[in-house]
Amino acid sequence: MDPKIESILDALSVAVFIVNMNQTIVYRNAASVSLFGKEQRVKKLANLVPNKRCIRAVEDVLEGGNRQSVDVRLQLVVPTSFRMTVAPLDTDGGSTTATVVVSFEDVSHILEAEQMRTDFVANVSHELRSPLTALYGFIETLQGPARSDEQASDRFLKLMEKEAARMARLIDDLLSLSKVQSSERFAPTEKVSINPIIERVSASLAPILDKEQTNVTTILTDDLPEIFGDVDELTQVFSNLIENAAKYSSPGSTVFISSFIDEKEPGTVCISVVDQGEGIEPEHIARLTERFYRIDKGRSRDKGGTGLGLAIVKHILMRHRGRLQIDSTKGQGSTFSVLLPLSF
Ligand SMILES: Nc1ncnc2c1ncn2[C@@H]1O[C@H](COP(=O)(O)OP(=O)(O)OP(=O)(O)O)[C@@H](O)[C@H]1O
Ligand SMILES: [Mg+2]
């Protein structure tokens, strides 16, 4: 093969094979080696791709058929989804010297994104449907059995208000998430002081802290340098973390909030929210920032949660070029640390 063409084929991220009439590989590019491995003894395409549909497609094209594509999932080091395309190279109506080009494009990330989108739509519909179903139920009762029962009507109207508020909150959180995701590429440009934000948030959460019977102790470093940040978004971050700490710990416990420069990470401001709650099992920790992920769905719902709080926190911190670190010991409590760079 012309060395220039070979260089071009090696520069592609798609795996390319040239296969002859016996389905023997007569050429493979560099990407095919990184995707399928460098197995010297492999002569036949079927040894690398043990899939009947793929082999049949190659046969068809070798026998003079038109270009065709097959979507296939192959068990390589990890299961990988490919779009395989077979195109005639030198077929000439199925002669004995026929060759075809077989390419494999890794489409796993496209399918994953599509799956995430489908899951998200399904989750949102489900989350909206449950308060809506409850509302329909109350409306029916108010139109029927409770029509002239003033006490029951009052009670049902209060419950209906709670369900409607839950739907409104879900929509607000979804809009918040979509807004911060769409602005994620643009980091904040204004300098802000962290401590006043924490103090304001703690004060505004007083009613929730009272309701959950949680005390808050703040230990803020006085001369903390300013960081690049968005006051409203950071308010959302600390509100959710402090509210979670209160909601998911037992009455009478204390939440400690501190701000400091971590000696291990000198260019970073750290704000930690430490609770004395039930703690979180390690298998849940990595998933907490997924949209709608809740350890105990019923409990989160009872407390009016949507399960979007930590997903919003994660995206806000990504926009701030920072991150969230979660450490927890079951039975002892959890520490949610917000790490924000001083400059970027
Ligand atoms: N401090 C904590 N201790 C124990 N579990 C926690 C803590 N913070 C969060 N979680 C768990 O993580 C889940 C996700 O939290 P997240 O803030 O995203 O949602 P939520 O609090 O349920 O709802 P929302 O924040 O929308 O009101 C919670 O449902 C809870 O199971
Ligand atoms: Mg929350």
Image: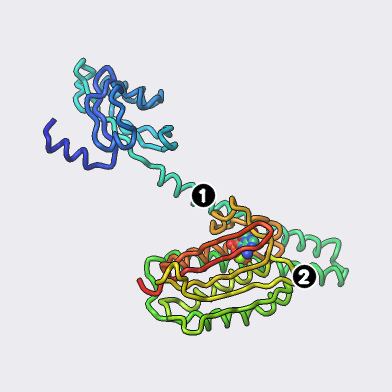
- At label 1, the amino acid type is Thr
335 relative to 95 in the view: left or right: right
* Residue at mark 1: 118
The quadrant holding residue 212 is bottom right
- Above or below 246: residue 38: above
- Ligand 1 contact, mark 2 (Cβ < 8 Å): no
> The N terminus appears in which quarter of the rendering?
top left
Figure quarter occupied by ligand 1: bottom right
- Residue 313 x %, y %: 52, 66
Q: Residues within 10 Å of mark 1 (few under 14, many from 20)?
A: few
Say which of 169 and 142 sits in front.
Answer: 169
Q: Residue furthest front?
A: 263
Say which of 18 and 238 sits in front.
Answer: 238
For residue 157, the mark is 2
For residue 189, the mark is none
- Residue 141 x %, y %: 81, 61
- Above or below 125: residue 221: below
- Ligand 1 contact, mark 1 (Cβ < 8 Å): no
- Residue 237 x %, y %: 53, 71
80 relative to 237 in the view: left or right: left
- Above or below 225: residue 26: above
Q: Residue furthest top?
A: 96
- Residue 145 x %, y %: 86, 61
Say which of 208 and 222 sits in front.
Answer: 222
The quadrant holding residue 190 is bottom left
Asked if residue 169 can be seen in this view, the reply is yes
19 relative to 113 in the view: left or right: left
